[in-house]
Each structure stands twice: as C-alpha cells, then as structure tokens.
Image (spheres, rainbow, N blue to C red):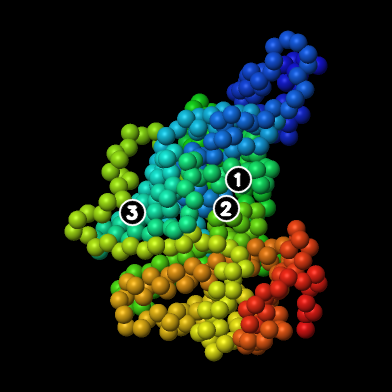
Amino acid sequence: MNYSNNINTQIKELKTKASEKLDTKIHGAISKSLPQGGKPYKRRITMKSNIARFATCITVLIIATIAVVHFSGGKIDFADPVFADVMEKIYRAKNLTYTQRMITPKSDFTSRKITTDTGLMRTELSFGSVILFDDTNGTQMTIDTVQKKCFINRKVGQKKSPRPFSRIDWIQKMHHVPAEFSHSEVLDGKETDIFMIKIPYETTTIWVDSQTDLPVKIVMEQLPNTEAQVVMPSYTLQKKDFGGSTYDSVSFMIGSGRGSGMGITDKMTVIMTDFVWDLDLDPSLFSFEPQDDWEVVENKQQDPKFDKDVLIKALSFWTEMSEDRFPDKIIDLMDPALLNPMLIKKYNTGGDPEEQFKQACNQVQTVLSGLYFTQEKVVNNDFHYAGAGITFGDADTAIAWWLNEEADTWTIIHADLSVDEAAKEPPIE
C-alpha cells in the first residue's frame, strides 16, 4: 500500500470536516513522517522525542490553576498530526502571558498570569495583590500591596523536578486520551483549528492559530460526579476567628490533577484568552525578596498526602474536639458550622494571632486531605462510613472501610482508630 496516495481517503473517513488549509497541513504532516520508497510502512506513528517529553510548556497554560489538562504523549492518528505541530511550537516557548477567568457557582473572578518553562508563575489579581509560585520547590508568596505584607508558604517534603508541571504527561498517559481535531472557525479575525480533550466530567477545548500553530484560547469545563455524590473538599478560614485582622481569610480547595476524570469537583469553567508568547520578561517580576519595609509572614507546610493515615488524623482531631463523637457523615468534616467551633476552641487560646491562624490552617489542610481520600474511594463505590452515633474507643466497631482492589482485601478503621486488613467486608447494620 502506498500510504502517501491514500492520505486523502483517510481524511475523507474522518467524522469532522477538514478545511482546505487543514487538509494540506495534515497531508504534509503525515507525508513527512513516512519513509520514502522500500517496503510499505506499517508501524503506527507515536509521539516520542521532545513532543511527548514536553509536559512543561503546555502547562504554562494551565497547571498552576487546576492541573488537569494534558496535551503530551499519546498516539498520533489521522485526526491529530496538526496538534503535534502545536506541541512542537509550545515546546520551544519560554514563557506565556494570558488572562484567566474562573467561574464557579460561588465566584467569578479574572486574573492576569505570567508563566515560564522553568516553573515560575506570577498571578496579578484585580484588587492589586500578586501571587508568585515556584513549582520546583513548592514556594508561594502572596504580596498584599494594600497592607504591605508578604505571606510566604514553603512546602516541606515536595520532590523537586527538573521539568516542572510534569503532571500533564502523567494525566495524559493515565487517561490514554490525546487531543482530537474538532473543526475550524474564525476567532477574533483569525482562522483557528479547534482541538478537544474529553475525559469523564472534564472537557478541554483549545483554539489554535492556523498561522502560528500556537493556542489563542482555552476553555476547560469540569463537572461534579453527581451519580457518586462526591464532594470537592473546600474551606475558608477567617483570621479574625483567631485574633487577627477582620479582613483576612484563607480559602482551601483540594482537587487538581489527582482526581482528574473522577468528578471530585464543583462545577467550574476556566477561560484563558489574550495569549502573548515569549515576552522579554523582567526577572524582578518573579522576585521572592520582600521589600525591606514590608511585614513578612512565613509558614512551612507538609506536602499533602491522601491516605488512610491522614484520614485517621482527621478523625482523631474530630473526636478530640467533639467529646469523642465521630462525625455523623464523612462530609461533615468540611461543614464550617461543625468544624469552625472546633478550630477556634483548639487554636484561639490568646496567643500570637499569626501563629494561631497558621496552626488552624495546617489542621484544615489535614482534615480536607483526609476527606479527599474518602472521596476517591467513593468514586469507585467501595468506601463505607458508619460513624454516626459512635464514640471513640470500641476496638470491635467498624466506622469506615474500603476495598483494596489490587490486594482484594478490605481495610477497616475501628472506633479506637486502629486499622485491620480483612478478607471480607464487615457487616452493615
């Protein structure tokens, strides 16, 4: 079979209608990949080399926001050779500036972002504050220009990576879903080719400039998994509850790439526009050195883990602060009407407000991480909770259990927070 002569037949078999320009680009892209002469070429074309390894610069677009878009790796078939060209262009990019709008049921805000292929991100918020993030060492600095304060958070235990944002490559391989060509359209006077990545509960649409082969718009849509009734752990702490400022608060939200395709999220739409590639950036934009006359608040935080140990820590805190009672429902762990009084009682003891607030924040991180672990299990329909009405101490009473599919055993947490592995599920009363 002569593959070059058969390209037009393959294109006609596509479900989407290709434009003349796209037809030419596909024909050229595939023809370049074929050997000239000799035996028929039968091996499938796969993305290797720098394209597949570049899980970095496409995250220049996304990862620091929600870390769920995955453009690298995967097989190239007749629907997506043009996206390989896009990946090549992105691979060569050094930085990107863009506008991002994030829409959830509770909020709608816009920010301006600058990201680099070395793992640095600068987020400029509409009310004047700036957030800097260094993905290579987990350092984040929030600059409050109104109060002249810098809040620096350093993650402890995070593995440094020579190629930041590598989670994109991980997710792409996990889902085995490459970007697919959808159609062409004119956007803001530019001819664009549209590609889509679809996985359960998530759809990402990418508009690519047909002339430059670089994205000009991205829309990411996430939906909650309503069938499994999962929740995305989130919480907001007010500093005033711990002796601090009336106007300061910190919000927590655990989701990101770890739960990709599971629907552990609220409904969320992220729209990215106004892309500018490879500006000559001033290094001071990413300086983590606070101004001399500004107040600096530093905090060290363990890189979050999602396992049975963190769930036990969350339940231990709850029983400690609620007269040994376990929560009636596992999602009560994120109910502010229940959790906030516990946090205030534990940490607002008349000491330094900043230190008290820091300790409360770390505790919230632990509680939400434990809840997130349960939601991953709920998605797989193998997590059960029976803590309602149970008090701490009974080693024979199971309060939570889940199936370990690989080992075909059940992990059981008892009311004294001891853990057993069993061949059978405990009886549900």
Q: Quadrant of the N terminus?
A: top right
Secondary structure beneath disc 1? helix
* Mark whose residue sits in front, 2 or 3: 2
Q: Which is more toward the observer, 239 or 309?
A: 309
For the question of whether residue 235 can be seen, the reply is no
Q: Position of residue 102 (x, y in %)?
A: 48, 55
Where does label 1 land, which residue?
A: 170
Q: Is residue 368 left or right of residue 400?
A: left
Q: Quadrant of the C terminus?
A: bottom right
Residue at the spot 64% in from the left edge and 31% down from the top edge: 47
Residue at the spot 40% in from the left edge and 79% down from the top edge: 347
Question: Cβ–Cβ below 8 Å for labels 2 and 3?
Answer: no
Question: Cβ–Cβ below 8 Å for labels 1 and 2?
Answer: yes
Q: CA distance from mark 2 to mark 3?
A: 24 Å
Q: CA distance from mark 3 to mark 1?
A: 29 Å
**Three-letter residue code for mark 1:** Trp
**Comes first in the chain, label 3 or label 1:** 3
